[in-house]
Structures are given as structure tokens and as C-alpha cells.
């Protein structure tokens, strides 16, 4: 029985990697029930083997592209395959390490087209948040409505809300449109400790908004606030996950980045599925939660199961952390495009030919 289950997990994750994305990390998420160590080792071996085999997928081959969804863009005489359109509802971070900027970069890295509704403008850099100006609820509603009128939205990722008024607007928006996939990262504080959601907003998430999401992804401090429980280890994380589902959530991933071991707990209402990975230095990083939730939304829009989406998202975040580099004097944002490096044009090539194509963009000779 264990061998059959292990083989199924191997096959599913291998196919997910082959058909969807390039995941180079050898420390993916894992499911380990009774035979925990065996499953963890098996899944690590799966992803590592896929990386060794060179499972590298281009944008055209990605299962997230429009051809898989049967959608083609034919506006203005264009007939290119249309990427899934994903909506980010979150605050704006001028340093672009978190919030809508991180969401949009993650969507693009997964072959999706991102649009965004801004819940708040922040004054911040890598060293911290200095000021927060929440978007008026009427303006947020207008942003959401105009996007929904124009685009076929495949998935929604929710982040910072700012206050209860904005949370209510989002709940009404979700009720009106019934999107297939909604991933909610219930941001309550910035990585440096600034409050990003008022007390009434927190109560509204717990009572109403979490019911409207496909999955909610609180970190340990956020899960403690939502449930009122104290979380010290993975068993406490499991208890919190169960309580959040009892509160109305369809599924939850309690993120363990603040714990001694980097184990997340996924609970879909039926089964507890731990997701293991590398332990990053949370105190030095910025935007990990936004990126994780956005990557899950991208994979769900491509038809993945929640377990597969979370597994691949965790592997992506692990590698983006590994490749991260400092841009300022404070926390380090992730390298969302570690798979997509663009070579600069050759030195000394500056003139643009009469036909309008820069030499660096000329097609290679065959």
C-alpha cells in the first residue's frame, strides 16, 4: 500500500514538473503521514531526479498558456495564445519586494498575465514601512469592477486589505463573480512589524472572508490571531489548521517559516498534509508569503490540485530565496525570475538598423 501511494505521488509530482514548470530545488514540499520519512525521502528524490533529467519547460510548452485553456487572443488582428489572467488584490510596496509587485512578478514567472487592484499605498523601503494610506473602499470597488468587466479572471490572490471596509468590498466582489480559485494570504503586519489591518478587519476575515477563499495561507502569528491558539510546534499548527477549517475555510496552509523547522501544514478538511522544505532566514527576507500564495494561485489556474500547487509553489519560493540578492540596506526580496535571465546586448552595439531591429534582437543564424 505504501509503495503504491509513494509511486502515485512520484508520478503526479514528476508529471507536474514535466508539464508545467522548471523547479530546480532538491528540497520540495512533501507529504508524510504514518510513513513520514519514507514519503519525504521519496518526494525529495522525485524532484531532484526531475531536475537532473533537465525538465525545463519554455513558455510555449507551459500548461498555463492559453492554448491549454482553449483561449486565443484575436483582438487587433493578434491570434497568439492567451495566458491566464490572474488578479492581485493587495497593497503597493515601492521597493517591490512584497504586495502587488511581488504578486505580478510571480504570475509572470509562471506564464500568467497579472492585473492588480491596490488596497493601500505604503511608504516603505527594504528597511521598513513608514506610512500606510488605505485606498478608499469606493475606489477599491471601482478598480475591481472595471477589471472584472474587461478580463476573464482565472484566479484571485488576496493580500493586504488595510481595513474592514476594504475587506467587505472584496467579499462582495467575490460573491458577485464566483471565481474558480481564490488564494488569501491574510496579511496583518509587515515583515518589520507595522500593522497592516485594523482589528475590525481581522474579525471580518475570521467571520466572513475566509469562507470565500479556496485556501487561506496564514503564517504562525496570523494563525494564532485567527484562532486564539498558541502555536509552539507542528502539532499546534495542525490544531490551528483544523480550527480554521471549522471556522468555515475550505482549506488552509499554516506556514511554518517562523518555527524552528520549515514545515507548512496543509489541511483540506479531510487530510493533514505536511509540506517540508529548507529553513530560510525569515528575519532577513521580504515577500515570501506574497510569493508563495501567488505561485499557488498560478498553479491552481493551470488545473493543479491544491497539494500539487502548494508543493510546486514551495519549491519555487525555496529556489527564489536561494537566488535572492540585496537591493538596499534592509531585508532581501526574492529573485522571482531566477529561471529567466536575459543577457545584455554585446558591448559596442548601439546603432539601430534602418529596419528598426536592434542587433541584439536579431534572430540567430541557423
Image (tube, rainbow, N blue to C red):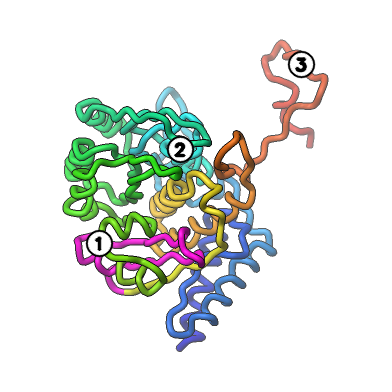
- Identify the residue under disc 3: 350
Q: How many marks?
A: 3
Q: CA distance from mark 1 to mark 2?
A: 33 Å
Q: Are marks 2 and 3 in contact (CB under 8 Å)?
A: no
Q: Which residue: 46% across, 77% down? A: 32
Q: Which residues are magenta?
A: 241-270
Q: Which residue is mark 1?
A: 228
For the residue carrying disc 2, how many other residues have a C-alpha within 10 Å: few (<14), some (14-19), or many (20+)?
many
User: Sequence-wise, which precedes: disc 1 or disc 2?
Assistant: 2
Residue 47 or 80: which is nearer the viewer? 47
Q: Position of residue 8 (x, y in %)?
A: 48, 76
> Left of 320 or right of it: where is 359?
right
Q: Please report the residue visible at 53 percent of the width from the left and 57 percent of the height from the top.
A: 19
Q: Residue furthest right?
A: 348
Circle 1 crowding by C-alpha within 10 Å: few under 14, some 14–19, many from 20: few
Left or right side of 225 for 55: right
In the image, taking residue 228 as reference, residue 107 lies left or right, namely: right
User: Is the Cβ of the residue at disc 3 closer than 8 Å to that at disc 1?
Assistant: no
How far is disc 3 from disc 1 in space, using C-alphas? 62 Å
- Disc 3 crowd, CA 10 A, few/some/many (<14, 14-19, 20+): few
Please state which of the two labelled residues, at mark 1 or mark 2, is closer to the viewer: 1
Badge number at residue 104: 2
- Residue 264 highlighted magenta (yes or no): yes
Amino acid at each position: 500500500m505504501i509503495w503504491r501511494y509513494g509511486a502515485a505521488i512520484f508520478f503526479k509530482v514528476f508529471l507536474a514538473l514535466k508539464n508545467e514548470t522548471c523547479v530546480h530545488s532538491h528540497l520540495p514540499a512533501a507529504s508524510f503521514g504514518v510513513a513520514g520519512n519514507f514519503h519525504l525521502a521519496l518526494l525529495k528524490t522525485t524532484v531532484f531526479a526531475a531536475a537532473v533529467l533537465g525538465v525545463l519547460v519554455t513558455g510555449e510548452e507551459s500548461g498555463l498558456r492559453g492554448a491549454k485553456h482553449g483561449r486565443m487572443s484575436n483582438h487587433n488582428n493578434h491570434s497568439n495564445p492567451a495566458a491566464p489572467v490572474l488578479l492581485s488584490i493587495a497593497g503597493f510596496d515601492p521597493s517591490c519586494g512584497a504586495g502587488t509587485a511581488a504578486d505580478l512578478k510571480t504570475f509572470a514567472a509562471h506564464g500568467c498575465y497579472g492585473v492588480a487592484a491596490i488596497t493601500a499605498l505604503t511608504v516603505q523601503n527594504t528597511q521598513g514601512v513608514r506610512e500606510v494610506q488605505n485606498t478608499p473602499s469606493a475606489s477599491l470597488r471601482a478598480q475591481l469592477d472595471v477589471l472584472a468587466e474587461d478580463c476573464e479572471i482565472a484566479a484571485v490572490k488576496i493580500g493586504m486589505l488595510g481595513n474592514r471596509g476594504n475587506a467587505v468590498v472584496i467579499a462582495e466582489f467575490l460573491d458577485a463573480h464566483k471565481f474558480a480559485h481564490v488564494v488569501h494570504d491574510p496579511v496583518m503586519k509587515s515583515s518589520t512589524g507595522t500593522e497592516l489591518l485594523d482589528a475590525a478587519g481581522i474579525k471580518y476575515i475570521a467571520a466572513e472572508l475566509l469562507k470565500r477563499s479556496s485556501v487561506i495561507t496564514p503564517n504562525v502569528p496570523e494563525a494564532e490571531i485567527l484562532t486564539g491558539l498558541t502555536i509552539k510546534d507542528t502539532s499546534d499548527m495542525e490544531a490551528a489548521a483544523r480550527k480554521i477549517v471549522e471556522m468555515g475555510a475550505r482549506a488552509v496552509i499554516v506556514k511554518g517559516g517562523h518555527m524552528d523547522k520549515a514545515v507548512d501544514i496543509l489541511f483540506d478538511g479531510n487530510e493533514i498534509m505536511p509540506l517540508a522544505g529548507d529553513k530560510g532566514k525569515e528575519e532577513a527576507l521580504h515577500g515570501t508569503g506574497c510569493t508563495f500564495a501567488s505561485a499557488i494561485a498560478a498553479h491552481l489556474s493551470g488545473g493543479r490540485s491544491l497539494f500539487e500547487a502548494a508543493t510546486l509553489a514551495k519549491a519555487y519560493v525555496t529556489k527564489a530565496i536561494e537566488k535572492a540578492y540585496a537591493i538596499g540596506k534592509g531585508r532581501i526580496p526574492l529573485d522571482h525570475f531566477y529561471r529567466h535571465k536575459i543577457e545584455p546586448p554585446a558591448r559596442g552595439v548601439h546603432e539601430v538598423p534602418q529596419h528598426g531591429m536592434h542587433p541584439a534582437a536579431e534572430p540567430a543564424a541557423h
